[in-house]
């Protein structure tokens, strides 16, 4: 499905997608940009439930621990 972006940066969500995901007027959407692609996720009443599992397969815990290790090394602490 293709849509266009207006001069004001607006676009239309195709009816088939709106119906499938229950997106109605006034619905909130989250735009997720991972640097390679953009995902648009409708936010339900429970936003934590909506986003649960979005990082699956991205090894986020390993990445976090590696980043913390680099932070400690920059601070001169080696644990």
Image (spheres, rainbow, N blue to C red):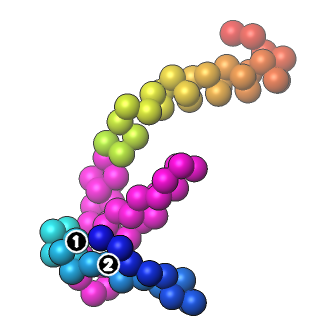
- Which residue is found at the position 34% from the left and 52% from the top? 51
Q: Quadrant of the N terminus?
A: bottom left
29 drawn magenta: yes
In the rendered image of this protein, does residue 13 appear above or below residue 8?
A: above
- Which residue is found at the position 47% from the left and 58% from the top? 38
Question: Which quarter of the picture shows residue 8?
Answer: bottom right
Q: CA distance from mark 2 to mark 1?
A: 7 Å
Question: Which quarter of the picture shows residue 73?
Answer: top right
- Which residue is found at the position 49% from the left and 53% from the top? 37
Question: Which quarter of the picture shows residue 63?
Answer: top right
Residue bearing the label numbered 1: 17
**Badge count:** 2
Which of the two residues, 55 or 75, is positioned nearer the viewer here? Answer: 55
Crowding at label 1, few (<14), some or many (≥20) Cα neighbours within 10 Å? Answer: few
Q: Residue furthest top?
A: 79
Contact (CB < 8 A) between labels 2 and 1?
A: yes
């Amino acid at each position: 499905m293709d849509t266009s972006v207006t001069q004001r940066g607006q676009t239309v969500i195709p009816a088939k997608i709106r119906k499938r995901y229950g997106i109605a007027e006034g619905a909130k959407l989250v735009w997720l940009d991972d640097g390679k692609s953009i995902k648009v996720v409708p936010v339900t009443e429970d936003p934590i439930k909506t986003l649960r599992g979005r990082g699956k397969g991205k090894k986020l815990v390993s990445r976090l621990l590696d980043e913390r290790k680099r932070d400690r090394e920059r601070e001169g602490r080696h644990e």
